[in-house]
Amino acid sequence: MSQGIYQLGRITHHSALVVGESVFVWGGERPDLPQALDHDSLQKRKLLSTINRLEFRTGRWSSHVTRGTSPPLGPMGYFCTTRNNEILFFGGWCGHDICYHNDVNSFNSLTYEWSNIIPTSDAVMKRGFGGMVCLESMGTEYLFMIGGTGSTPTTYQSQYQYFQLDTGHIHTNEQNLLNISTRQWIVPTISGQYCPPISGFAIQKVTNNKAIMFGGSVTSGDNRNDVIVNTVYTCQLQSDSTIHWESVKGPVVPASVQWPMERRLHAITGIISDSPTLVMIGGEGKDGLVNDSWLLNTSQYQWSKIDLPESVTSRDTHSLSSIMMSPDCVWLVVVGGGAATEWEDVGRGYKEPFSDYITDPNITMLIELVLREGEWKVSEVLDSTGLTTEAYQHKYQS
Ligand SMILES: [Zn+2]
């Protein structure tokens, strides 16, 4: 690798958001962050006051100091989505004990400024490791938060379930709506077949008012252990603040259709075309990393496998983002994540599982998919080193 080029280091439990022709990555679990972060301090704020940016034009990462009020203080497993030039953050794990956040912060990708949109409150559960999308109804934009793992809630809402895991963390299917213009929390009405308490799933917006969820770990009934699932859920915001849920569980005729196995800590992004398609990469199954990648046609809920190298698929707790280069060409960016779980000898004959970080040259992978005869096919895969070559820049400019 060329010397002097800034590279994003090892990272897990983060999100990567595309705004314009850049990918932004904030927070995450990193080997250069202290093992346990304090709740709030000048030092923590300073550590979290940087953001990484990958520009498609150059294929290069750069690190920037952020401005404004304060960065969010839950850098791991935060909920995250974009809105115009803004990146919106909710919650996240604090970095110590069973401590989570529930404030909403906005990062302006043009000015690099943070602003606190909604301060912490008792109205919603403090949590991380769930999902958030920006949905629209009757011309009004809402942030929709679903599920996750968090600390003991102040307010238990009767329409949701809260299960205490053996670790003391609380697992939930709580759902919240935030009216972005009035900045008010709204308790939605829930209808249809919605998910049990769930975390570690992936969610992607597919139309103005609809999102699709896949996988994750769930708890239900008196089973306090997580069960990893492969259910597709759709949730749709209706005009009266009702979230209508439907679930599609496994193939209708098992032998005749492909359906991905159960997983959590995978990543999903969308391809915008005549029929919205989702791309899913990696994750962890019952027996370790699942090591595969899939496309989901969202009009018929048909899955098909795509052929990507292990250097891309063999990871969990990574991020996946996409940018349309033309109607028949999409670039996917996979960032970071954990590699296979290994067993570390902690002495006296005991072994503990630990998940190692993905390392370079595989930290940033760029995948080009092209639409040929109605099917998305892999046409190129570049790693962190490939992105820094002149050949890449020529390709971008062509
Ligand atoms: Zn804390």
Image: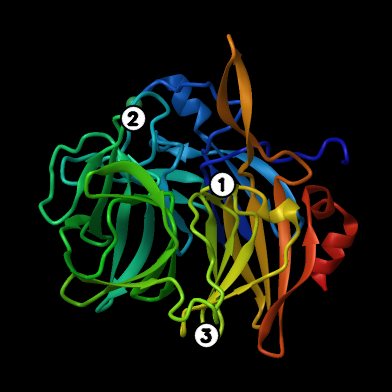
Q: Amino acid at mark 2?
A: Thr
As drawn, which residue projects farthest toward the front? 255
Q: Name the foreground residue: 305 vs 72.
A: 305
Residues packed near mark 3 inside 10 Å, few (<14), some (14 to 19) or many (20 plus): few
For the residue labelled by badge 2, is the local secondary structure a helix, a strand or a loop? loop
For the residue labelled by badge 3, is the local secondary structure a helix, a strand or a loop? loop
Earlier in the chain: of badge 2 and badge 1, it is 2
Q: Is mark 3 within 8 Å of ligand 1?
A: no
Which dot marks residue 275?
Answer: 3
What residue is pinned by disc 2? Answer: 167
Which residue is painted at 71% across and 60% down in the image?
56
Which residue is painted at 46% across and 84% down in the image?
299
What residue is pinned by disc 1? Answer: 287
Q: CA distance from mark 2 to mark 3?
A: 42 Å
- Observer-side mark, 2 or 1, equals 1
- Residue 50 lies, in percent from the top left, at 55, 36
- Residue 394 lies, in percent from the top left, at 86, 66
Q: CA distance from mark 3 to mark 1?
A: 33 Å
- Residue 398 lies, in percent from the top left, at 83, 74
As drawn, which residue projects farthest toward the top? 348
Residues packed near mark 2 inside 10 Å, few (<14), some (14 to 19) or many (20 plus): few
Which residue is painted at 55% across and 82% down in the image?
256
For the residue labelled by badge 1, is the local secondary structure a helix, a strand or a loop? loop
Q: Is residue 62 visible?
A: yes
Earlier in the chain: of badge 2 and badge 3, it is 2
Task: Tell me which corner region of the image, top left, top right, bottom left or bottom right, holds residue 245.
Answer: bottom left
Q: Is residue 252 left or right of residue 16?
A: left
